[in-house]
Amino acid sequence: MREILGRRRRLRLRRGRRPDHLGAALRCATEWDWPVLPGVGLTAAGGRGDRDRGCACPDPECAVPGAHPFDPGLLAATRDPRLVRWWWTNRPDAPILLATGGSAPCAVSLPAVAGARALAELDRMDMRIGPVVATPTRWSLLVAPYSLEQLGELLYAKDQVPSSLRFHGEGGYLVLPPSDTGTGQVRWEREPLAGSAAPWLPDVEAVVDALVEASSSAPDGGSRLRY
């Protein structure tokens, strides 16, 4: 009986524990060599609770509440653990933003429903993929760094590319777990392997090829990536 009560107590503690944004940001910057910065975050409107939280930026109609750079700007992204520690010590709940491109990971994202279908189809095809970031609205497949020129040549060579795809490359950013944004909690749908150095990332062309094939392989002639 004592053992059962102890397990229940530990479970309650875990459920009530705040996500460790600082630890996650330091892991990205120091273990994985990914440049990060804090997002603008959310603010409570009138102190009425989570449902009334909006973006902390000055734009009342912000399209991506909490999930974008503001102060500091995107160019401040760093791998320096001292700066990362200072940022998240002062703002422990700030979202974690990855500055994509250059030598950092890039991503291909889809609406959440299409993303779930795509992953199921890629698994069926035995396609090896890297980490996948999920929000309630979009899923992002992390890929190896690519330049805008490489992306342009890749898309030009394709007969058709699903219109639901978005590309997060040079000069872009991606919100990483365990951030909380205006659309909800950010999580790993496919988490980087524990104990590894920088997570393995597939080539963007291989991922786009697989997504194009998955999109056009629906039995009814439609797209598996529709939403």
Image (cartoon, helix red, strand yellow):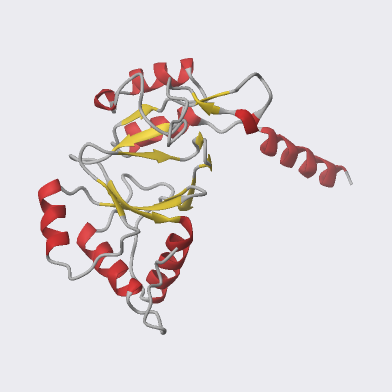
The image shows residue 212 at horizontal and vertical percentages of 28, 69
**Horizontal and vertical percent for residue 195?**
41, 46
Height in image: 99 above or below 194?
above
Is 39 located above or below residue 212 in the figure? Answer: above
| Tally of numbered tags | 0
Name the residue rendered at 79%, 43% in the picture.
8
Q: Residue furthest bottom?
A: 219
Pick the residue in front: 191 or 70.
70
Quadrant the C terminus occupies: bottom left
From this view, report whether residue 141 is shown above or below residue 180: below
Taking the view exactly as shown, the residue that stands out farthest to the front is 61
Horizontal and vertical percent position of residue 136: 52, 49
Q: Is residue 19 above or below residue 88?
A: below
Q: Nearer the viewer, residue 159 or 197?
A: 159
Q: Which residue does the image show at 42% across and 40% down from the upper left? A: 176
The reply to whether residue 101 is in sight is yes
Q: Quadrant of residue 226?
A: bottom left
In the picture provided, is 161 more to the left or to the right than 82?
Answer: left
Residue depicted at x 73% and y 42%: 11
Position of 18 with respect to 163 (left or right) is right
Q: Is residue 203 visible?
A: no
Q: Residue at x 41, y 84 (%)?
A: 219
Asked whether 11 or 21 is in front, the reply is 21
| Residue 161 rendering spot, x and y as whole percentages | 25, 65
Q: Is residue 22 left or right of residue 53?
A: left
